[in-house]
Image (tube, rainbow, N blue to C red):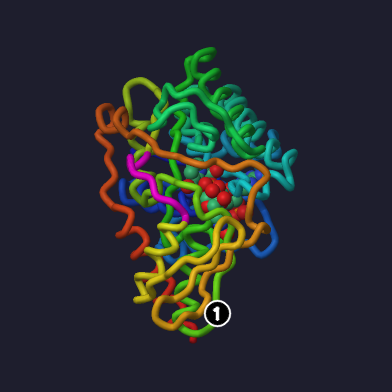
Amino acid sequence: MAKTALITGIRGQDGAYLAQLLLDKGYNVVGADRRSGGANYWRLKELGIYKDIKLEYMDLLELTNIIRSIEKIKPDEIYNLAAQSFVPTSFEQPMLTSEINAIGVLRLLEGIRQVNPSTKFYQASTSELFGRAHEIPQKETTPFHPRSPYGAAKLFGHWITVNYRESYRMFACSGILFNHESPLRGMEFITRKLAYAVASIHFGLQDKVVVGNLEAKRDWGFAKEYVEGMWKMLQLKEPDDFVLATGQTHSVREFIEAAFRVVGVHLVWEGSAMNTVGRCKKTGKTRVVVSPDFYRPAEVDLLLGSPLKAKEKLGWKPRVGFEQLVDMMVEADLKRLKKEI
Ligand code: NDP
Ligand code: GDP
């Protein structure tokens, strides 16, 4: 009989790719969707799977709703991808972020425990747990040191998942995923913000892009590959926690340079720190401006993950490299904008 998976955060980047993967594997996929005004299913539509998914209204803020949904759907696997996922918003809304990203995880685990403790559970943990990183590269045993309310709330989500596994023998896994991007990434994140800006600048729709800290480094991978790792974790004999990462790191500055190169623009930099500008080498036009508006109260300077354990125990490894990822994202936005104009 086909398995049933319940995915929270179905309207997000990972929710869409995971739904596609599980449908391909023959699962019944139910998307937990909070009722919100102007609900937008563009990602599911872009992947052509909107009609193949059942939607269930379920909000991580409401335990009774979670319990009823689990009773009704009877999922074999639950993937908790829902979150307030943007770090800067977590500084503005630390309580709401914690309600969703920390207590929301507990509500789900408690729902599973009460309704059917044999339901398998995946928790979307994050490299933001490492924050001010204690070692390079970061792996499953690296101490955590979150640098934002987002990271601190996810830390609770991570440990409560471990705790329910150890206390109640639940099949609960936590995937410590490093940044993963795609053409379906939210516009507020730096990679998609840049892909879209470069495409807009290329078509003359905007002059420049305003960004924050150029020196932060991230281990950026391709989201579609990362959701495969989530599924693999839930197919193990014993539940465990895994880092998913590429093992390579690049700065925001390098991402910007690579994104502009896709449209044939070579940047030269002038100034330093918050007074930096990036100009087109050929025309001299200013294309990048740094503003304190996009700096954070506390920064995560360097993330670089080791996917070694995932390689050995899950047989998971990333294939899409940095340049290919940047290229894919800029090309996708060029294509989208070309259709619109
Ligand atoms: P997105 O921001 O694209 O998606 C998050 C989803 O969570 C949205 O669909 C949102 O719904 C939903 N959501 C928010 N609050 C609630 C709530 N109270 N109840 C129910 N649903 C809610 O994130 P990604 O797909 O990029 O990431 C998936 C998960 O992985 C997140 O938990 C994120 O924190 C984590 N993660 C992501 C990484 C990345 O690089 N992408 C790295 C490491 C971890 P709505 O559409 O209504 O806003
Ligand atoms: P995060 O790693 O989950 O916080 O993902 P983001 O894509 O939001 O940010 C990645 C890094 O880019 C962080 O170190 C940010 O400080 C840095 N950054 C620099 N400029 C910007 C910007 O304009 N927007 C965003 N979102 N991040 C920026």
Q: Quadrant of residue 247?
A: top left
| Residue 224 horizontal/vertical position (percent) | 36, 51
Residue name at image x 57 percent, y 44 percent: 82
- Tell me if 231 is positioned left or right of 197 in this view: left
Residue name at image x 31 percent, y 32 percent: 310
The reply to whether residue 27 is in sight is: no
Main secondary structure along the magenta-highlighted residues: loop
Residue situated in front as seen by the camera: 263 or 90: 263
| Residue 49 horizontal/vertical position (percent) | 42, 60
Q: Is residue 35 above or below residue 3?
A: below
- Tell me if 131 is positioned left or right of 248 in this view: right
Density class for disc 1 (Cα within 10 Å; few <14, some 14-19, many ≥20) is: some
Q: Amino acid at mark 1?
A: Asp
| Residue 5 horizontal/vertical position (percent) | 44, 41
Residue situated in front as seen by the camera: 294 or 75: 294
Residue name at image x 55 percent, y 79 percent: 207
Q: Quadrant of the N terminus?
A: top left
Residue name at image x 47 percent, y 33 percent: 122
At mark 1, the secondary structure is loop
Pointer 1 residue: 207
Q: Is residue 173 above or below residue 98?
A: above
In the picture as drawn, the residue positioned furthest to the front comes out as 271
Q: Quadrant of residue 175?
A: top left
- Magenta stretch bounds: 245-252
The reply to whether residue 92 is in sight is: yes
- Image mark count: 1
| Residue 254 horizontal/vertical position (percent) | 41, 57
